[in-house]
Structure formats: C-alpha cells, structure tokens
Amino acid sequence: MDEIIKIFREEFSYINREEKTIKEILSNENNYFIERRDDGNNLIAISVINKNTILFFFVDKKYRNKGIGAELLKESENLIKNNGYNNVIVGVGFNYLMPGVPTSKKYYDSVNECLVKEVDDIASTFFEKRGYYHSWDCNCFDMKMKLSNFNQFENSINDTIKNVKYRWANIKDMEEIVDCADDACQYQDEKFSKYYKNEQFYQETSNKKVLIAEKENKIVGCIIVSVETEAKDLGNVGCTCVRFSETHQGIGTNMVILGTKYLHDIGLKNASLSYTYSGLDKLYGNAGYKISCYYMMATKKLV
C-alpha cells in the first residue's frame, strides 16, 4: 500500500484525495493487485482491480513503450473476464482514487480551462488504442483556483441575496437538506443526498460544513465546504444542489462564491472541486475556478 500511495502522490500530485480514503480503497478485501518489479524489487508497474473496475493503473516512465503496460492491461482484462464480468471500467468503482483516466483531452466543448502542466493525453491515447472509449455524453473534470485570485467580496455567509438567505446548516436541517439534494438530483443517476447524511458535517467544529440557501423558510440549496481535508492550505466546495424549481436564479453560483469566500477569509491558499461535469464549468467558473484536468471515463466491452 505504501508503495502505491507514494507513486500516487508523486506522479498524480494534481489529484486531491484524502489519505484516509486512499488507504480504505487500497485495503479493500475485494482488490486484486497485478504488479511488475525491476531487478532491485522496485515497483515499476501496477494495476489495482476491484470487481470489474481498474482503480489504479500505472507504468513508470522509464519502462513505457516496452510492452509492459499492454501486457499488464491484458492480464487485468482477463482477470475481470474470468471473474464473470463482460465489461471493464477505469476509475470509479465502489469508490475511486481518480474518476477516470487523467487527460488533457476534452471530449466536448468547455469554458474556463487552465490545465495543470503535468497533465497530457498519453494515458487516454493508450486506452483508446486498446478499444476503450469515453462513456459519458459530457466532459468530466477537476477545477482549481488560487485564492489570491478570488475577488468577489460583496456578500458573506448570513447575508440575504434576492430574498434568499445563506447560512451554515445545523443538525436540525439535515432531513430537509437530504430532501433538497434528492430533488436537485432527481434526473441524475447519482444522488448527492448520501453525502449530506453525515452528522459530523453539522457540528460547529467540523472541517466539513454544509452551507445552505433558504427561501421563505424552505431550504432550496446546499453545498459542502471542506477545509484541509485533502491537503494543507487547500479548501474544497462540492456536491452543489439546488431544488429543481429554483434553478437558474443564481442560487448555486452564490453558494459557490460564498463558500469560496469563506475559504479565502480563513487564510487558505488554494481551492478546488473534483469529479464534476459539463455545465458546471460555467457555474464554478463564475466564482473563479478553472478546469485543471479532464478525465476519460474509460470503459470497454470484453468479448
């Protein structure tokens, strides 16, 4: 596990995941590990497989273009097929280290892009050449911002903007927040409400808090704001939800801006959000976030 975490941190430093989450994923009892080592027993290539998902796939730069990656991928596919599955996914399974294959390639139009220098299209091209395709009908990406560039200070948490009050939630709000999240996600495959059921998020001292939008005493929006959960000096916003009947009124944008202003005001240097999709590049971009990395949501039929 320590070897893989070291590789992940060094080679994918632009991807933010909590240490606790990484360890929980890598220690899952259903994982398979296929590896290659050099003569000095150093790990040079690894595939971590869980059910029909390749959670992590890596070949050291010095050993690429030698057939090692192709061989490792074929072994991974054979293992998945022999376990009874007819397709393979790269990225998100029961959880994820990264949503998909990191790439500089976008599959659909986007705005507010500023890719990190470490990302390229080598990995996505590798998978595409071997029959994998991007399975979403939109882009998947991460976004980042240096908080020194944040410049929207007109409002703060506890302000009322256009008849909507923005405040921190407490435990009494949880049931209505879950309902709000379910309403917001009613046309999506994934329901964000599961993330809002953690009672710790409603404690005053928690490093993860829920910011809500309230209109006429009804919760119409919610967002999770996190402080240094993934890295020092890094804050996060995410799981943005607005009731379907209240969309296109600037509520989501205001929650993102106010949550980000909070991260700025407490002295953090950077902010990010992970694993989001086309359309939200505009929403988060209104607060100053830029797309830092795209993901190929790679999948392949096994025959």
Image (spheres, rainbow, N blue to C red):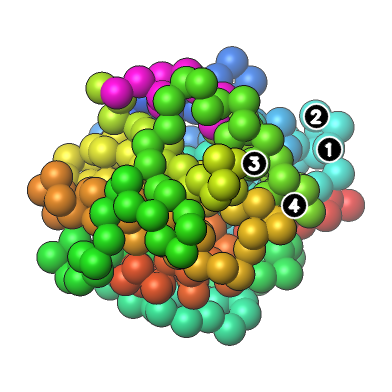
Q: Are marks 3 and 1 in contact (CB under 8 Å)?
A: no
Q: Earlier in the sequence, mark 3 or mark 4?
A: 3
- Local packing at callout 3 (Cα closer than 10 Å; few below 14, some 14-19, many 20+) is many
Calculate the distance from the C-alpha at mark 1 to the C-alpha at mark 2.
6 Å
Q: Residue 236 appears at what percent x and percent y?
A: 34, 47
Calculate the distance from the C-alpha at mark 3 to the C-alpha at mark 2.
39 Å
The magenta stretch is 196-204
Q: Closer to the observer: label 3 or label 1? A: 3
Q: Which residue is mark 1?
A: 85
Q: Are marks 2 and 4 in contact (CB under 8 Å)?
A: no
- Above or below: residue 84 compared with residue 299: above
Front-most of 302 and 260? Answer: 260
Query: Identity of the amino acid at label 4?
Result: Gln
Query: Identity of the amino acid at label 3?
Result: Cys
Give me the disc on residue 180.
3
Residue drawn at 13 percent across, 65 percent down: 148
From this viewpoint, is residue 18 visible? no
Residue drawn at 55 percent across, 40 percent down: 217
Q: Which residue is mark 4?
A: 188
Residue drawn at 29 percent across, 23 percent down: 204
- Above or below: residue 185 compared with residue 178: below
Q: Residue 139 appears at what percent x and percent y?
A: 60, 69
Label 1 secondary element:
loop
Calculate the distance from the C-alpha at mark 2 to the C-alpha at mark 4.
29 Å
Q: Earlier in the sequence, mark 3 or mark 1?
A: 1
Q: Closer to the observer: label 3 or label 2? A: 3
Calculate the distance from the C-alpha at mark 1 to the C-alpha at mark 4.
25 Å
Calculate the distance from the C-alpha at mark 3 to the C-alpha at mark 4.
14 Å
Q: Earlier in the sequence, mark 3 or mark 2?
A: 2
Position of 167 with respect to 300 (left or right) is left
Q: Residue 71 appears at what percent x and percent y?
A: 60, 51
